[in-house]
Amino acid sequence: MGKAEVLALLREDEYISGEEISRQLGISRAAVCKAVSSLRTDGCLIDAVTNRGYCLKAAAPEESRLRALLQDCPWNVRVLRETDSTNNALKREPNAPHGSVLIAARQSGGRGRLGRCFSSPPGGLYLSVLLRPRAEAAELLHLTPMAAVAVRRAIQDCCGISAQIKWINDIVAEGKKLCGILTELSGEAGSGTLSAIIGIGINCNTLPQELPEAVRPIAVSLRQLLGKPLDANLLAAALVHRLYEMDAALLTQKNEWMQEYASACLTLGKQVQILRGRTRTAALAEGIDENGCLRVRYENGETALICAGEVSVRGMYGYI
Ligand code: BTN
């Protein structure tokens, strides 16, 4: 008798006392406490109120619920309680088929672009999908921007929030980071064995105090924006649906998706700094090309196309 049974007794809008749980399951009060604490570590948000008991505020990603929500999607979705990084975990499966989706309730070694760490406490949604596109790497430069549009659409579907995009891989709301995307390609060019892993980390129910101090001022979660917790399964299902739609559109509806990307991109029209290693160059962000590269104009009037590579773009005075 363990936490699955305890979880089954918790309701989203009703409190149940520890005593009642212990009576119904025939386990000790200490075992109830232990199960609740373990469920919290898994990413469940459980409220505890003296004299009332426990109430489930938001469920963590759960494979059986996700499968039920994704009956019309042929992709294979698995949920892990914890892994180092869902991108790494998929890389460790060289034979995983196209459309393998891995979700974790937390990551011990989450990775971001440019070798950065991506803090991944419980409450966030950490999802990677493996695609085996029938295309060459050069035809897939728009993969991250298309994934950004898919994330934006999923957030709109699930929460009614119209998020923006900070070039190239951040989803932003109220000027703060809601989500980051890390796309990794592998396989030999021209060999027809190319695979792409798109990793997406969304601050779903993340509490600011669970993030590193340096990140807190520039991060926001859906929970903060909505003023209440969100069922991570609904968000994950919306995201998988939108990624599935993206995969179908990858080579045929690129222009339409890239137009949506450009119109949601808050970097455009702004003075930015282009960061290459330790070098910072000021420029005006003027446009986005069909591959998602940023067209900029330097102060000397020259223009250039910035493609993701080793570059990051910041606002003149901060994150945006
Ligand atoms: C960034 O902000 O630079 C990108 C962050 C990408 C984070 C996601 S979480 C799921 C997947 N696993 C990882 O280790 N990274 C990506």
Image: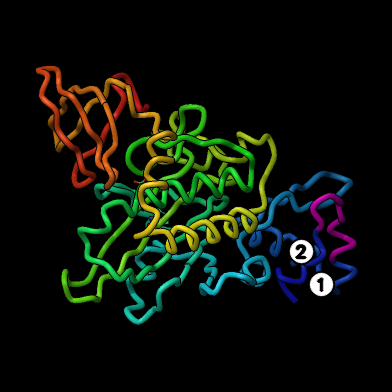
User: Horizontal and vertical percent for residue 69?
Assistant: 66, 65
In-image side of 92 versus 65 (left or right):
left
User: Horizontal and vertical percent for residue 237?
Assistant: 60, 60
Amino acid on which the number 1 mark rests in the picture = Ile
Report the residue at 59% width, 40% height from top.
222
Name the residue carrying label 1.
27
Quarter placement of the N terminus? bottom right
Note whether 72 is above or below 39 in the view shown. below
Which secondary structure, mark 2? helix
Name the residue carrying label 2.
32
Report the residue at 50% width, 51% height from top.
121
Alpha carbon separation for disc pair 2 and 1: 7 Å
Residue contact between numbered discs 2 and 1, judged by CB atoms under 8 Å: yes
Q: Nearer the viewer, residue 143 or 57?
A: 143
Q: Nearer the viewer, residue 76 or 12?
A: 76
Confirm whether the magenta stretch covers residue 64.
no
Quadrant hosting residue 67: bottom right
The magenta stretch is: 11-21
Quarter placement of the C terminus? top left
Residue most extreme to the bottom: 95
Crowd rating for badge 1 (residues with CA inside 10 Å; few <14, some 14–19, many 20+): some
Dominant secondary structure, magenta: loop
Which secondary structure, mark 1? loop
Crowd rating for badge 2 (residues with CA inside 10 Å; few <14, some 14–19, many 20+): many
User: Horizontal and vertical percent for residue 85?
Assistant: 39, 61
In-image side of 39 versus 307 (left or right):
right
Report the residue at 53% width, 50% height from top.
124
